[in-house]
Amino acid sequence: MTAFTSAPRWPVRAPLQTARHLLSRRHCPLAVGQRIADTSSTEPLHPVLDILKRRLERPSKPGQRKDDRKVALCIEGGGMRGAVSAGMVAAIKYCGLENAFDVVYGSSAGAIVGAYFVSRQLPVYGAQIYYDIICSIPENGQRFIDLWALRHHPYFRRKRRGSKEFYGKGTRPVLLLDRLIDHVMRTERPLNWDQFWKYHSQMPLKPVASSLSAMRSQTLDDFTSLDEFLERLRASARVPGIAGNPVEINGDFYADGLLFEPIPYRSAMRDGCTDILVLRTKPESAARKGTKPGIYEKHIASPYFDLFHVFSPRAKVSDYLDTGSHLNIYNEDMQILKLENKVPYSSSDAAIFSIAPPADGPGVGQLESRAKVVYEGVRNGFTAAYDTLSPFADGCLDSVPMATVTSAKGKELEQKMTAGRRAAKWVFSDSELEDVEKRHKEAKRIRDQVRRQKRNRTTPAAPESRRERIKRVLKRRRILRAKHRARANAAAFATIEERFFVG
C-alpha cells in the first residue's frame, strides 16, 4: 500500500489533535503518532497523494484554494460495508485532511457516510450508527436487517405467488432503510443540518443514484432543505426488491447506485475533477464478483421490476439485471482502480487513487448484523486510510510486529500492528465495543423476557357471562351462513356462465 514515505517537509503534529472537540476522545498517546518512516526511499508519490500532501503543508479551505486543482472524495457503499468507509473518513479527519477536498461523492451507504463527513460529525456519528444503532435491537423488536422477511418472498415460499401484493404494503423489507433515514438521522444520531449546509456550500456533497427512466447514474444535489436531502439519500440507498419501492423525485424514479455506478468516481470525472481519492469497502485481494446473475438478480430484483414496469418506461431494468451488466461494471471499476494506483490511467485526464481495506482483517458482508464484526470492519477501514494518508504512518511495514486475531468465522488471521492499526484500536477501543455488546445483550434479554411473558401468560381470563356467550355463538352462526351463501352464489354463477356464455 502506498504511503507518505518521502522526507517530511511539513510541520509535524499529533495526528489526533485535530479532533479534540469530539465526544469522549482523549489526546493521542505518543505511541500512536510515532513515525518509523524510511526517509531513504525515493519512490515518487502518486499525483493524488502529492496534492493532498501539498494542501496539508499549506493549509487552505474549500473555496479559497491557491492551486487550480479540483480534488474529489468518492465513497463506495455496499450495505453494511459502509462501516468500512466510515472508518476511512474518520481516519481522514484524524489526519487533518478534512479540508483538503473540494467535493464529495457518495453512492448508497457512502452518501450517508459522506453526509456526516461534510457536517464534521466524525467519528462518533459516522461509524457509530453501524455498530451501535443498526446492530441494536429497538424496543419494537424489528431490527434494521430483517432476514426473516425473505421467507415472505415468492422465491422462498412453497407456493410462489407472483402478484403485486408481495411487493406492496404488506411485504416487509429486508433492509429497513426508512428507519435509518427518518429515525436515526433525525433523532438518535441527528445530522446537524445548519453545520452541514455551512460546509456544503463550499464542499458540496453529491449523492449518486440510479435513474430508472434514463438507465444511467445521476447526482442528486438539487436540495435546499433537510427533508429534500434525506429523500435523496433514501433514493441513493434504495436497494431494489429488498429495501422498498424506488423513490420518485421530480417525476423520475431512482434506486440504489449499485445498478449503474457502485463506486462513484465516474461522476467525479464527468464533473471535471482533476484528482480523485476513492474509498473502497472490499480488499484488493478479494475475489472478483461473479459476472453471472445470482439469486438476487434472477429471483428478487428482476421479478420486482417486471411487476412494476412503470419504474422503467424507456427500458426494462429487469433485462439489465438478467444479463448481469451491473456486475460487469463493478469488475471493470476494480480493474481500472487497480491500474490507477500504479500509474495514472492513460485514457483519462484525472488522476485516481483508491484505498482498500487490508486483506488481513475480517471482512464485512452486505447484510452483516453482528456488532463485533462491524466494529472490526470500522477498525479495518481506519487502518487502511491512516496507513496511506498520515505523515505519521509506518514506512517500513516489514519490521512491524505481528499479532493474531480471530475472524468472524473463527479463522485465525495474522495482522501487522502498523501505526494505523494501533491508532484504530485507540480511537475505537475494546472498552467501547464491550459497552456496545453489553447494551445489545441487555436489550435482547429484555425483549426475550417480554416475549416469554406474552407466550406463557398465567393470568386466568375473566369468566364469560351468559350474554357474552350468546353473542359469540350468534356471531359465529352469521359468519358461517355468509360463507355458505357466498359458495352457493359462486356455484350458481359458474353454472349460468357455462350454459349461456361459453360456446
Image (tube, rainbow, N blue to C red):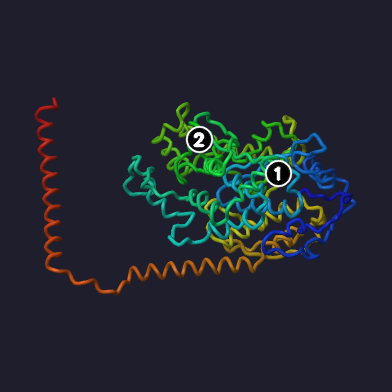
Residue under label 1: 354
Residue 282 x, y percent position in the rendering: 63, 49
- Residue shown at 86%/49% (left/top)? 6
Q: Is residue 162 left or right of residue 393?
A: left
Residue 60 point in image, percent of width and height? 80, 44
Q: Which of the image's four quarters has the C terminus?
A: top left
Say few, some or many: other residues with alpha carbon within 10 Å of mark 1 (under 14 / 14 to 19 / 20 or more). many
Quadrant in which residue 103 is drawn: top right
**Between residues 179 and 348, which one lies in front from this camera angle?**
179
Pair 2/1: label in front: 2
Q: Amino acid at mark 1?
A: Ser
Query: Percent position (x, y) of residue 412?
Result: 63, 63
- Pointer 2: residues within 10 angstroms few (<14), some, or many (20+)? some
Disc 2/disc 1 C-alpha distance (Å):
31 Å
Q: Amino acid at mark 2?
A: Ile
Percent position of residue 372, x then y: 58, 62
Vertical placement of 284 versus 495: above or below? below
Residue 122 visible in the picture: yes
Mark 1: which secondary structure?
Answer: strand
Q: Is residue 290 visible?
A: no
- Towards the viewer: 231 or 135: 231
456 relative to 269 in the view: left or right: left
Secondary structure found at label 2: strand
- Comes first in the chain, label 2 or label 1: 2
Number of numbered tags placed on the structure image = 2
Looking at the image, the residue that sits furthest to the front is: 194
Q: Measuring 68% from the left and 37% from the top, which residue is drawn there?
A: 336
- Mark 2 — residue? 249
Q: Are marks 2 and 1 in contact (CB under 8 Å)?
A: no
